Image (cartoon, rainbow, N blue to C red):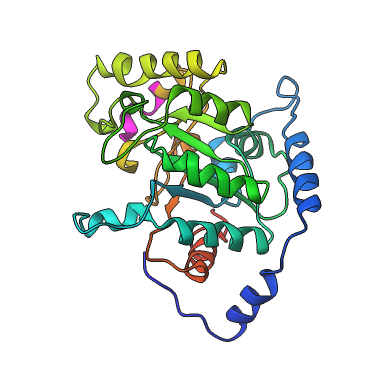
Amino acid sequence: MRNFLLVGAAATLFLASCQSSNAKKVKTDTKVATEEIKIDSVNTKPADNKTILARREVPVLCYHQIRNNIASDSKRAHDDIIAPDKFKLHMKMLADSGYHSILPDQLYNYLVYGAKLPEKPIMITFDDTDEDQFTIGNTALKKYGFKGVYFIMTVSIGKKGRISYMTKEQIKQLANEGNTIASHTYDHKNFAQFTDADWTTQIDEPTKKLEQITGKKIEYFAFPYGVFKSSTLYKLKEHGFKASFILSTSRDENFPLYTIRRIIDPGRYTAKNLYYSINKSFNKTKS
């Protein structure tokens, strides 16, 4: 991804959209958005793959570490690190621009059953279980009435060190507060390299552990590194997942629900950069 020039009418559009949101309105919109996910799935025919692919894509953002860079961080790592102050500014921009956060069930019902979504929907996701996603990320989201999706790598739960990871109690709190807890394998193994045994160790066992922690079904998955293998995507449904998420590569035409696109919000981006990246990546229809 590259930074985009801010010129003419586009800059005017950005400034016009970035108006402060009323806190009461945010709460009302969140309630409405939640109510709209109720679908009569028994009597409503699910969409076929062509229809799903033709629906306008909903922006999905991906975050990893929310912290300041340190000298030992590699150049590549900078894409996965965003400073706390910058993350907060990016969330403020989303709220001021009129975005409303949605969760995977809402996105699934929109794609499969044509359910209505709130105006300017966006999904905010976090990978890898880092504790700063709870202490900084969740706190910032709450300020604007946003909810998040937390893709948990179960091997690291509760571990402390140079990077600290969320505890079971923190994950449970996120679930209790209405966020979505989802799977990101046991130890971040590349999905394209799965063996038969990995479907137990990387998929089934993490699902069971997260369900024990949250008391809720785990129905969504994010691919480590965003890498998937088309020939085994069908197995995700067999193992209980309704949908799964990649990064910015193309969706699989045969499994659009299991290759939902996300983009990383790099630490080098300003709020304006993110705004234009969202519109460039998602503000279009697919045929």
Q: Name the residue located 18 percent from the left edge and 54 percent from the top edge.
A: 72
**Dominant secondary structure of the residues highlighted in magenta in the image:** helix
Q: Residue furthest bottom?
A: 8
Quick check: 170 above or below 163? above
Magenta region: 228-235
What percent of the width, then of the height, locates residue 131? 41, 37
The answer to whether residue 281 shows anywhere in this view is yes
What percent of the width, then of the height, locates residue 99? 65, 56
The total number of labels drawn is: 0
Residue 232 among those drawn in magenta: yes
Q: Quadrant of the N terminus?
A: bottom left
Q: Name the residue located 64 percent from the left edge and 50 percent from the top edge.
A: 143
What percent of the width, then of the height, locates residue 147? 61, 41
Quick check: 234 above or below 3? above
Residue 233 among those drawn in magenta: yes
Instruction: Write down the quadrant of residue 153 in the picture.
Output: top left
Closer to us: 246 or 113? 246
Q: Name the residue located 21 percent from the left edge and 59 percent from the top edge.
A: 71
What percent of the width, then of the height, locates residue 211? 50, 16
Q: Is residue 159 left or right of residue 139?
A: left
